[in-house]
Image (tube, grey):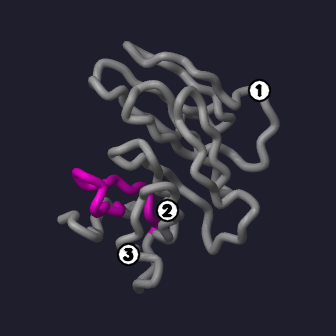
Amino acid sequence: QPAVGIAATPDGKGYWLVATDGGIFSFGDASFFGSEGGKPLNQPVVGMGADPSGGGYWLVATDGGVFTFGDATFYGSMGGQPLNQPVEGMTATPSGHGYWLVATDGGVFTFGDAGFFGSVASSMPIHTVVGLFPTGGGSGYTEVDADGIPSHFGTAG
Protein backbone atom coordinates (compact mmCIF):
# COMPACT_ATOMS: atom_id res chain seq x y z
CA GLN A 1 0.00 0.00 0.00
CA PRO A 2 1.27 3.53 -0.73
CA ALA A 3 2.39 5.82 2.10
CA VAL A 4 -0.03 8.73 2.55
CA GLY A 5 1.08 10.42 5.76
CA ILE A 6 4.11 11.15 7.91
CA ALA A 7 4.60 12.46 11.44
CA ALA A 8 7.86 13.27 13.22
CA THR A 9 8.83 12.37 16.77
CA PRO A 10 9.10 15.36 19.15
CA ASP A 11 12.91 15.34 19.08
CA GLY A 12 13.01 15.08 15.26
CA LYS A 13 15.14 11.91 15.40
CA GLY A 14 12.46 9.63 14.02
CA TYR A 15 9.18 9.45 12.17
CA TRP A 16 6.18 7.29 11.36
CA LEU A 17 4.77 6.62 7.90
CA VAL A 18 1.18 5.47 7.41
CA ALA A 19 -0.15 3.61 4.37
CA THR A 20 -3.68 3.67 2.95
CA ASP A 21 -4.50 0.38 4.72
CA GLY A 22 -3.54 1.93 8.08
CA GLY A 23 -0.21 0.11 8.28
CA ILE A 24 2.44 1.98 10.29
CA PHE A 25 6.17 2.01 9.62
CA SER A 26 8.46 3.39 12.35
CA PHE A 27 11.94 4.83 11.75
CA GLY A 28 14.66 6.22 14.01
CA ASP A 29 13.45 6.69 17.60
CA ALA A 30 9.75 6.39 16.64
CA SER A 31 8.15 3.55 18.62
CA PHE A 32 5.47 1.32 17.13
CA PHE A 33 2.16 1.56 19.04
CA GLY A 34 -0.07 -0.44 16.70
CA SER A 35 -1.81 -0.02 13.36
CA GLU A 36 -4.94 -0.71 11.35
CA GLY A 37 -2.94 -2.73 8.80
CA GLY A 38 -4.72 -5.98 7.91
CA LYS A 39 -8.02 -4.85 9.45
CA PRO A 40 -11.13 -4.02 7.42
CA LEU A 41 -11.62 -0.28 7.02
CA ASN A 42 -14.69 1.62 5.79
CA GLN A 43 -12.45 4.04 3.87
CA PRO A 44 -8.70 4.34 3.24
CA VAL A 45 -6.42 6.13 5.69
CA VAL A 46 -5.14 9.46 4.34
CA GLY A 47 -3.13 10.98 7.16
CA MET A 48 -1.76 10.90 10.66
CA GLY A 49 -0.78 13.14 13.54
CA ALA A 50 1.74 12.50 16.31
CA ASP A 51 1.01 13.07 19.98
CA PRO A 52 3.54 15.73 21.06
CA SER A 53 4.63 13.43 23.91
CA GLY A 54 5.99 10.97 21.35
CA GLY A 55 3.96 8.22 23.01
CA GLY A 56 1.24 7.77 20.40
CA TYR A 57 -0.40 8.84 17.18
CA TRP A 58 -3.74 9.30 15.43
CA LEU A 59 -4.76 8.08 11.97
CA VAL A 60 -7.60 9.55 9.88
CA ALA A 61 -9.54 8.03 6.98
CA THR A 62 -11.28 9.83 4.09
CA ASP A 63 -14.65 9.48 5.87
CA GLY A 64 -13.25 11.35 8.89
CA GLY A 65 -12.90 8.25 11.05
CA VAL A 66 -10.10 8.62 13.62
CA PHE A 67 -8.02 5.78 15.08
CA THR A 68 -5.82 6.20 18.17
CA PHE A 69 -2.69 4.36 19.28
CA GLY A 70 -0.39 4.58 22.29
CA ASP A 71 -1.25 7.46 24.61
CA ALA A 72 -3.03 9.49 21.89
CA THR A 73 -6.52 10.25 23.22
CA PHE A 74 -9.69 10.00 21.11
CA TYR A 75 -11.49 13.37 21.05
CA GLY A 76 -14.06 12.59 18.37
CA SER A 77 -14.31 12.10 14.62
CA MET A 78 -16.44 12.77 11.56
CA GLY A 79 -16.89 9.05 10.90
CA GLY A 80 -20.55 8.36 10.09
CA GLN A 81 -21.30 12.06 9.48
CA PRO A 82 -22.15 13.49 6.04
CA LEU A 83 -19.22 15.35 4.48
CA ASN A 84 -19.21 17.72 1.50
CA GLN A 85 -15.77 16.43 0.47
CA PRO A 86 -13.47 13.70 1.81
CA VAL A 87 -11.04 14.34 4.64
CA GLU A 88 -7.49 14.81 3.36
CA GLY A 89 -5.40 15.00 6.53
CA MET A 90 -5.03 15.83 10.18
CA THR A 91 -2.65 17.45 12.62
CA ALA A 92 -2.44 17.46 16.41
CA THR A 93 -2.69 20.59 18.52
CA PRO A 94 0.58 21.64 20.16
CA SER A 95 -0.75 20.46 23.56
CA GLY A 96 -1.72 17.02 22.21
CA HIS A 97 -5.19 17.49 23.70
CA GLY A 98 -6.93 17.80 20.35
CA TYR A 99 -6.59 17.72 16.60
CA TRP A 100 -7.81 19.29 13.38
CA LEU A 101 -9.13 17.35 10.40
CA VAL A 102 -9.11 19.04 6.99
CA ALA A 103 -11.19 18.10 3.94
CA THR A 104 -10.21 18.58 0.30
CA ASP A 105 -12.57 21.56 0.02
CA GLY A 106 -10.81 23.21 2.96
CA GLY A 107 -13.44 22.35 5.55
CA VAL A 108 -11.89 22.20 9.03
CA PHE A 109 -13.20 19.98 11.83
CA THR A 110 -11.98 20.58 15.37
CA PHE A 111 -11.77 18.18 18.29
CA GLY A 112 -10.51 18.53 21.86
CA ASP A 113 -8.74 21.86 22.38
CA ALA A 114 -8.40 22.57 18.64
CA GLY A 115 -9.96 25.94 17.85
CA PHE A 116 -11.77 26.88 14.66
CA PHE A 117 -10.30 29.99 13.01
CA GLY A 118 -11.89 29.82 9.54
CA SER A 119 -11.33 27.92 6.30
CA VAL A 120 -11.26 28.28 2.53
CA ALA A 121 -14.34 26.02 2.25
CA SER A 122 -16.68 28.93 1.52
CA SER A 123 -14.34 30.84 -0.79
CA MET A 124 -14.44 30.84 -4.57
CA PRO A 125 -12.92 29.35 -6.61
CA ILE A 126 -13.01 25.93 -5.01
CA HIS A 127 -9.63 25.01 -3.58
CA THR A 128 -8.23 21.50 -3.38
CA VAL A 129 -6.64 21.56 0.07
CA VAL A 130 -3.87 19.05 0.70
CA GLY A 131 -2.83 19.91 4.25
CA LEU A 132 -3.15 22.02 7.38
CA PHE A 133 -0.52 22.95 9.96
CA PRO A 134 -0.89 24.90 13.20
CA THR A 135 0.93 28.03 14.29
CA GLY A 136 2.93 28.03 17.51
CA GLY A 137 0.62 27.76 20.46
CA GLY A 138 -2.28 26.47 18.36
CA SER A 139 -3.99 29.86 17.99
CA GLY A 140 -4.18 29.60 14.21
CA TYR A 141 -3.35 27.41 11.25
CA THR A 142 -2.49 27.50 7.58
CA GLU A 143 -4.26 25.50 4.89
CA VAL A 144 -2.21 24.68 1.78
CA ASP A 145 -3.87 23.94 -1.56
CA ALA A 146 -2.67 21.64 -4.35
CA ASP A 147 -0.94 24.59 -6.06
CA GLY A 148 1.09 25.28 -2.91
CA ILE A 149 -0.87 28.43 -2.08
CA PRO A 150 -1.26 29.01 1.68
CA SER A 151 -4.34 30.46 3.36
CA HIS A 152 -3.80 31.71 6.91
CA PHE A 153 -6.32 31.78 9.74
CA GLY A 154 -6.16 32.98 13.34
CA THR A 155 -2.63 34.11 14.22
CA ALA A 156 -1.04 32.31 11.26
CA GLY A 157 0.60 34.42 8.63
Mark 1 / mark 3, whichever is N-terminal: 1
Q: Residues within 10 Å of mark 1 (few under 14, many from 20)?
A: few
Which amino acid type is shown beneath numbered disc 2?
Answer: Thr
The outermost residue toward the left is 157
Mark 3 / mark 2, whichever is N-terminal: 2
Q: Which mark is residue 110?
A: 2
Report how far apart the C-alphas of labels 3 and 2 lie in the structure: 11 Å
Q: Position of residue 29 (x, y in %)?
A: 38, 14
Q: Position of residue 144 (x, y in %)?
A: 34, 61
Q: Are marks 3 and 2 in contact (CB under 8 Å)?
A: no
The outermost residue toward the top is 28
Q: Which residue is mark 1?
A: 38
Quarter of the figure with residue 59:
top right
Question: Is the residue 62 above or below the residue 106 in the image?
Answer: above
Looking at the rendered structure, the secondary structure element under dot 3 is: loop
- Tell me the chief SS of the magenta region: strand
